[in-house]
C-alpha cells in the first residue's frame, strides 16, 4: 500500500522546488516579466539622463573651463561622467527594490494557507524562508544584468582597470547585497499576517536606505551624521565595490574591505533568517 | 503500529492565555477508518488538525500519528501524512501538474516516481485533460480534486481533510465525496476529516466525534448515534382531535414514547417501517380515522441538537480566518480571481 520509504531526504530538493515556484510565477507571466524588465530600463533612462550634473557645470553664468569642470566632477564622483557613476549605483538600487518585495509573498502564502500546507510537509523550515530569499536574489541579479547592459548601450564608459572578468566580481557583490537585503525583508515578514504592515515597513525603509548611501551622491559631501549612517549602510559598500570594478582604478585594499563587509552582512542576516524561520514559522 | 492510526490523549490548545480552542480532547482512530470531526465553525476542529499535522504545538496532552509522537518525531509524522487544508493552496499561476509535482518535491520524492504517481492521480480525479492548464482557470470542484491529489502524492498512511467541501455547491460536493471514496478505495489510507456539514459526516464517516466549544461531546458511528436518540420519529393525526389515544398507541410493541402536540401525535418508535402498520391497525381497531401520517429517520441534525442543545451555528472567528475563507469561497464558486 504505502511505499513512502523511497522518498529521499535531500534538503535541497524542497528548497529548489519552492524557489522555482516563485521564479515560475515571474517568468511564466509575460506581463509581469516584461514589467520587471522594462522598469529598470525606464529608471536608468530617467534618473541617469534627467539628473544632468555635468550640465550644471557647462551651463554656468560665468563659463568654467571644461578642464576645471571635469576636475570638479572627477573630485566629487571619482569619474568625470556622472551618468556612469549613477548607472552603476542603479545596480544596487534595482537590487534594493526587487528584494524589498520578497517579504510580501511570505505574507500572502500565510494568508492563503499555502504556508500551512508547506509546513505540514517534511520540508526544512529554513528552506521555506531561503527559497524566498533565493528567488529574490536571482530575480534581482537578472534585472541588474539588464540595467548594466542597457547602461552600456546608452553611454556607460568603463574605467581603466575594467576587464570582462571584473563582471564576476560585480555580480558577486550584488549577490551578497541582495542575499542580505532579502533576508532582512523576509525577517520582517516572517511573523506578519498583514501585507499592509509589510508595505508600511517597506515604504519607511526604501528611500532612507537609498539616500543614506552613495547610490546617487558621494557620501564625503554629506553632513557628518548622515555620513555615519551611510558608512553602516551595506548598499554603500556594494556601490563602492561595483564602481571600483567598473569605473575606478581599483584600490585592492578597499575592494577587499567592501567584500568583507558585504560577506559579513549577507552571512549574518542569512543565518538569522534561517534560525528565526525554524523558530517562528510554525506557531 | 497497534492498529490505531491516531491516538490522541488530552490534547489542549489555549490561544492568548485564555481562549481555550481545544479542551482535553481524547480519541483513537483505527487503521483504515474514516473518522469525522463534526462541529460548527470555531469549535476547534481546525486547531485539532493543525496540532495533529505538527504545525501547531499543543499546550497540553499529546498524540501519535501512524505510531509517531507528534512532539518528538514530528518529521516522521510529516512524512507519513497527507494534508488537504481548508483553503485552496494550489498555486494559481502554475498548472495542475506543476502543482502536484511541487508537492512531490516538498516530500523529496524523486522526479521519476513523482511523475508516474502524478499521472495516476490525475487520471483518478479526472483532471488529465486539464493538467497543463493554469489552476486559475479551474472550477471549485476541480481545485478541490487537485488538492486531494497533492495531499496523496506521498502515499500517506493518514490523510487529513479539513472541511473538504467548504463553499462548494451541493452537486459538486456530492461529486467530491465520490472522489474521496474512490481515492480511499484505491489507496486504503486512514482518513481524518473535519466538517460542519452533517450530511457529509453521515455520508462518508465510519465514526464521528461531535465537537463543541473545544470539547468532544460524543463519539460513535452515525447510525449508532442516531439510534441512541431512541429510534425513528412518526407523526400521526386522527380525524377526531378531541380524544386522546396516546394510551392506545403506547401499548403497541416497540413504541417508546408518545407525545400529543396540538392534535398530532409525535411517536418515537424502533424500526419505524415495521411498527407503523401495527400502530395504524391499533388506531383503527379503536374506531379512529387516520388523516395524516409521516415517518422520519433521525438525522445527524437531531443528534447534534440532542448533544449540544442547539442547531448548528456559526461563531465569530479570527479576521485572518475569515479572509482566507472568503478567498476559498470565491475560488470555490468559479475560476475567476
Image: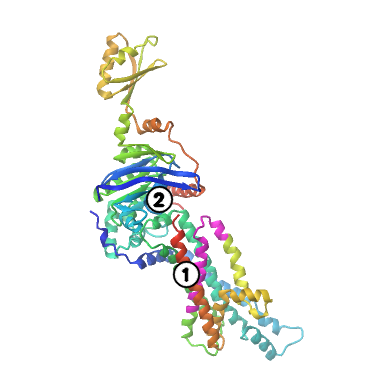
Question: Which element type, helix, strand or loop, lies under badge 1?
Answer: helix
Tell me what residue is drawn at x 51 percent, y 88 percent. A162
SS of the residue under disc 2: helix
Residue stretch in magenta: A171-199
Tell me which chain the residue with mark 1 is part of.
A
Q: How many marks?
A: 2
Q: Are marks 2 and 1 on the same chain?
A: no
Magenta span has B122?
Answer: no
Characterize the local packing of mark 1: few (<14), some (14-19) or many (20 or more) Cα atoms within 10 angstroms: many
Residue A44 bears which disc, if any? Answer: none
From the viewer's perspective, tell me whether residue B69 is left or right of residue A64: left
In magenta stretch: residue A178 = yes
Q: In this view of the protein, can residue A215 be seen by the observer?
A: no
Q: Nearer the viewer, residue B72 or B295?
A: B72
Q: Nearer the viewer, residue B132 or B258?
A: B258
Find residue A270 and name its label: 1
Measuring from the top left, give residue A53's x and y in whole percent.
Answer: 66, 80
Q: Residue at x 35, y 33 (%)?
A: B300
Residue A71, located in which quarter of the rendered image? bottom right
Which residue is labeled 2 in the image? B50
**Circle 2 chain:** B
- Using the image, determine if residue B311 lies above or below residue A198: above
Coloring scheme of the render?
rainbow
Amino acid at each position: 500500500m504505502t511505499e513512502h520509504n523511497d522518498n529521499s531526504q535531500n534538503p535541497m530538493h524542497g528548497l529548489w522546488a519552492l524557489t522555482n515556484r516563485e521564479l515560475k510565477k515571474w517568468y511564466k507571466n509575460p506581463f509581469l516579466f516584461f514589467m520587471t524588465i522594462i522598469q529598470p530600463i525606464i529608471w536608468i533612462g530617467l534618473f541617469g539622463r534627467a539628473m544632468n550634473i555635468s550640465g550644471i557645470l557647462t551651463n554656468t553664468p560665468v563659463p568654467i573651463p571644461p578642464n576645471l569642470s571635469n576636475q570638479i566632477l572627477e573630485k566629487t564622483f571619482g569619474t568625470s561622467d556622472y551618468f556612469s557613476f549613477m548607472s552603476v549605483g542603479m545596480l544596487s538600487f534595482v537590487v534594493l527594490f526587487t528584494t524589498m518585495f520578497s517579504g510580501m509573498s511570505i505574507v500572502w502564502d500565510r494568508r492563503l494557507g499555502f504556508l500551512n500546507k508547506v509546513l505540514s510537509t517534511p520540508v526544512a523550515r529554513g528552506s521555506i524562508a531561503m527559497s524566498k530569499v533565493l528567488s529574490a536574489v536571482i530575480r534581482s541579479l537578472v534585472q541588474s544584468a539588464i540595467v548594466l547592459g542597457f547602461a552600456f548601450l546608452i553611454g556607460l564608459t568603463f574605467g581603466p582597470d575594467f576587464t570582462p572578468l571584473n563582471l564576476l566580481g560585480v555580480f558577486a557583490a550584488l549577490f551578497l547585497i541582495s542575499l542580505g537585503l532579502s533576508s532582512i525583508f523576509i525577517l520582517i515578514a516572517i511573523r506578519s499576517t498583514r501585507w499592509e504592515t509589510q508595505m508600511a515597513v517597506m515604504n519607511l525603509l526604501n528611500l532612507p536606505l537609498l539616500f543614506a548611501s552613495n547610490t546617487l551622491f558621494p557620501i564625503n559631501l554629506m553632513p557628518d551624521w548622515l555620513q555615519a549612517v551611510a558608512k553602516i549602510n551595506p548598499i554603500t559598500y556594494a556601490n563602492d565595490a561595483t564602481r571600483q570594478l567598473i569605473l575606478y582604478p581599483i584600490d585592492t585594499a578597499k575592494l577587499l574591505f567592501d567584500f568583507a563587509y558585504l560577506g559579513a552582512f549577507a552571512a549574518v542576516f542569512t543565518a538569522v533568517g534561517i534560525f528565526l524561520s525554524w523558530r517562528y514559522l510554525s506557531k | 503500529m497497534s492498529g490505531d492510526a491516531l491516538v490522541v490523549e488530552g490534547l489542549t490548545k489555549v490561544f492568548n492565555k485564555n481562549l481555550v480552542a481545544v479542551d482535553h480532547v481524547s480519541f483513537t482512530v483505527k487503521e483504515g477508518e474514516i473518522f469525522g470531526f463534526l462541529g460548527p465553525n470555531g469549535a476547534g476542529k481546525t486547531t485539532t488538525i493543525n496540532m495533529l499535522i505538527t504545525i501547531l504545538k499543543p499546550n497540553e496532552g499529546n498524540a501519535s500519528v501512524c505510531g509517531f509522537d507528534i512532539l518528538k518525531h514530528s518529521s516522521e509524522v510529516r512524512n507519513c501524512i497527507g494534508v488537504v487544508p481548508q483553503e485552496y493552496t494550489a498555486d494559481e499561476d502554475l498548472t495542475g501538474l506543476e502543482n502536484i509535482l511541487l508537492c512531490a518535491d516538498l516530500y523529496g520524492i524523486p522526479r521519476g516516481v513523482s511523475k508516474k504517481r502524478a499521472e495516476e492521480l490525475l487520471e483518478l480525479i479526472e483532471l488529465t485533460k486539464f493538467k497543463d492548464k493554469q489552476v486559475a482557470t479551474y472550477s471549485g470542484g476541480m481545485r478541490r480534486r487537485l488538492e486531494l491529489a497533492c495531499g496523496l502524492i506521498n502515499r500517506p498512511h493518514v490523510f487529513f481533510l479539513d472541511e473538504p467541501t467548504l463553499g462548494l455547491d451541493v452537486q459538486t460536493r456530492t461529486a467530491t465525496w465520490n472522489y474521496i471514496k474512490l481515492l480511499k478505495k484505491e489507496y486504503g489510507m486512514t482518513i481524518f476529516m473535519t466538517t460542519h456539514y452533517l450530511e457529509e459526516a453521515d455520508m462518508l464517516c465510519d465514526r464521528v466525534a461531535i465537537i463543541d466549544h473545544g470539547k468532544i461531546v460524543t463519539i460513535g458511528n452515525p447510525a449508532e448515534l442516531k439510534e441512541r436518540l431512541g429510534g425513528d420519529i412518526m407523526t400521526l393525526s386522527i380525524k377526531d382531535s378531541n380524544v386522546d389515544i396516546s394510551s392506545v398507541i403506547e401499548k403497541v410493541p416497540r413504541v417508546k414514547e408518545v407525545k400529543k402536540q396540538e392534535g398530532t401525535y409525535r411517536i418515537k418508535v424502533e424500526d419505524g417501517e415495521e411498527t407503523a402498520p401495527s400502530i395504524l391497525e391499533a388506531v383503527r381497531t379503536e374506531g379512529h380515522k387516520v388523516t395524516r401520517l409521516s415517518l422520519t429517520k433521525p438525522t445527524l441534525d437531531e443528534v447534534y441538537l440532542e448533544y449540544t442543545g442547539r442547531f448548528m451555528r456559526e461563531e465569530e472567528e479570527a479576521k485572518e480566518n475569515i479572509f482566507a475563507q472568503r478567498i476559498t469561497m470565491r475560488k470555490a464558486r468559479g475560476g475567476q480571481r
